[in-house]
Structure formats: C-alpha cells, structure tokens
Image (spheres, rainbow, N blue to C red):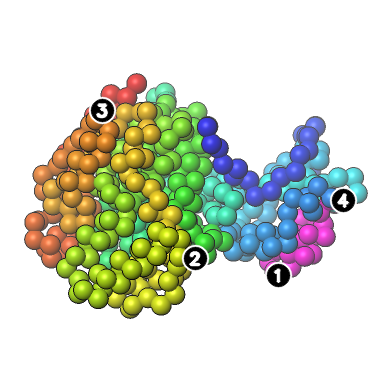
Amino acid sequence: MRKLFVLFIAASFTASVYGQTEPANYASALARFKLFYNTNKPDSIFKMFGPTMAAAVSPAQLSALKTQLGALKQTTFIAFADPTASYTAEFENGPLVLSLAMDKTGKIVGLGMKPAEVKATPLADDPNLTETPVLLKVMSASLSGTLAIPKNTTGKIPVVLIIAGSGPTDRDGNNPAGVSSNTYKMLASALGKNGIATLRYDKRLIGKSPSTTKEKDLRFEDYSDDAIALINMLHEDARFSKIIVLGHSEGSLVGMLASADQPVSGYISVAGAGDRIDKILNVQLKDQPDYIKNGFKKIMDSLARGKFTDNVDPGLYSILRPSVQHYMLSWMMHDPTVEIKRLKIPILIIQGTTDIQVTVGDAQKLKKAKSDATLLIIPGMSHILKEGPADKAANAATYKDPNLPLKPELVTGIVDFIKKIK
C-alpha cells in the first residue's frame, strides 16, 4: 500500500515527560523562526538547524514553505514533552499544529506540521450536517477540504471522497470559467441525509489549496497522489467504517488511479471518460476549422514522441500552451479502460443521457472493460448531474443555476451502491 508522507520535515527524536510550561529557549527559537519565516530569510532558519536537519532540508525547501502556507500570523503554546514543544500555528492559508524539537545545544532537530483540529460548525443551509474544515499538508501542497458529517449518527459511518472534475473546479463544483452549480456541495448534503459522510476538497493550485508546483511542473499523477494522501487520512479516522472514492469527469480517472491498492471499499465513476484524453479532445475538435484540427494532431503526435511545441496557435493555446504540455503528456499515458481493470473492489459507473461533455458510449466502454461493474444510465441528466435539456445551448445555461436540484436517481443510485458494500 502506498502511503504519502504528509509532514513537511521531522527528524527522529523521542519524547519524555509532558509539561504545560513553555521553556524559554523554545519560545525564543520559535520567535526567531517566525521572524525569519515571515521576512523571507530561509538561510537564517537553516542556520538554526542541527546536522541531521541541515542534511535533510535545504533553504529552497524552506522558502517554498511560505508559498504553500502563507504568512505565520501567530502561535499558541500547547504542551512540552522533552525535547518537543507543540503549538497551534495560525498560517494565512489555515491552521496547523507545529512541533518543534531541539537538542541540548539549542539547535532544531525536528520540525513537524500536521492539520489542526478545527471545531465543527453546522452548515448554514443544512442543520442536519456538521461541516469541518480540513487542511492536509503533502510534500508540495496544502490540500484544503470540507468534511461533512451527518448529525445524530451512532457508530462508524461510511465516507465518500469526492474528486472534482477538470480545470479550476473547486470543492463545491464551481468554476470561474462559467460554472456555478454547487454540485458537490449539494451531493454532500444529499448523502449526509442518508447517513453518509463526505470529504470534498480543492485540488492543488485551485481554490484554497496552494502549491509550490508550477503549472509547467504539474503532472496528472500529482492529483492521484493527493487523493491517496486524503484516502489514508480518512482510513486513520476511527469514525469511518469504509471509504468510497467518487470521481467526477476528469476526477473519474484520478479516482481510478488513487483507488488501486489502497484502503478503499468502493469506487464510483460519474461522467467519466472512456478514452484517453488525446482521443477525447480529437472528437471535441471535430467541428473546428482544418488548421485547428491539423495543428492539434501535429502537437499531440509530437507529445507522443516526447517532444514539446513552443509555438502554439491561439486557437489551441488554452488546452496546449507550452506550460501544460507536460501535464497533457502525463494525462494521455493513462487509458481509463485499462486503469479500471486494476480495481478489485465494487464499482459503480454513472452517466447521464444529456451530458454534452461525456457520452453514454464512454460509460459503456468502462462497463465493457470491467464487466462486473454496475452501470447506471440516468435519462435527462447533464454533466453537472442535474436535469439538462438536449439542446446544447440550453443545457450549458443550466451550469449557472446553483439552485437547480440534483437528479434524484443519482443520489438513490449512490446510496444503494454504498449500502450494499460489505
């Protein structure tokens, strides 16, 4: 089982007797750390490290930390267990628990960070749920999410990890490119009413999930690795009986990769593609002028040979600009019909008949590749999982209606599937 390391840095050390008084030398060291951190002086922080830490962490990594977490606004002492002091740390991008370990010479030998416990608050529009912010630190990003748990439940309950679709789609299912559907937020509410918890999150570089990863360095596997980190976090939470991964649109393939050989009890593909991304884009561009189609084919053929193109026609720039070509290459290396075969868990494939982005044929390809999967075709359901007319323009207009309800068959199908998983 692959399990990602979710602390920024931590050298090995042992703890002994607990105390509630902050040692003066720790207070002084933390004050200097905060000053150097906020004034962008990673070399000064590096000089505070003992040999083990200095060998494990570079000033460049320290510099990258601020990009991920934002400024350190304040710290509050929690406890001391020699040689480690623990603090709540209020960073600009969210709270963390900071652990600071020092040796007898006053050098830092351990620096750990993990998500802080945040008091749960009811959803403003759903008093039946409790919504808790989640912040998970992975190696080059901080993943911000929302854990929604139904109230008045007893014992362990199932939890669904919701993985968003392509582009800058956030944890609620909204996208600055013209989507205001609240799809994932509404799904969390609907599942909560059926006794099922959910975790939805902003992908790295989206919403409140900052990352040191630049667009040119992003790879498709970064998304699946992030999902694996969240799966393992949920697996360690004693409140949950089983984990189900639900991937929507591009998130379908991300979920397939993340669910393989992980502690996942079931997988749900919603509006997931049945072909590689290069084939999908080729179909989507079929009505474009010949120079666009030919330009696309030329660039994709070059990518298949591992060669990248600097001069991209403006008509293709949004999908094949130089900074995303490495990501596109990593994406086209994964065939959904191959990846779904790797899963040895119950699978549900859901597709709407009025989806203007993914077709019923895609769902049928996934079903053919995994014959024991359950296929659910929902008449009249669009890509945003709501009622959508057959007319493309009218269908696209519904993307901006956050009050349009989810298709009831969608929720019923997901709930029935989860209840049948042992």
Q: Nearer the viewer, residue 40 or 127?
A: 40
> Which numbered marker is on residue 216?
2
Q: Position of residue 4 (x, y in %)?
A: 56, 41
Spatial separation of the CA atoms under disc 2 and disc 4: 40 Å
**First of labels 3, 4 by sequence position:** 4
Under mark 1, the amino acid is Thr
Residue topped by disc 1: 39
**First of labels 1, 2 by sequence position:** 1
Residue topped by disc 3: 372
| Point 51% across, 42% down: residue | 229
Of marks 1 and 2, the one in the foreground: 2
Under mark 2, the amino acid is Lys
Query: In the image, is residue 355 part of the stretch drawn in magenta?
Result: no
Magenta residue span: 25-50
Q: Nearer the viewer, residue 197 or 320?
A: 320
Residue topped by disc 4: 106
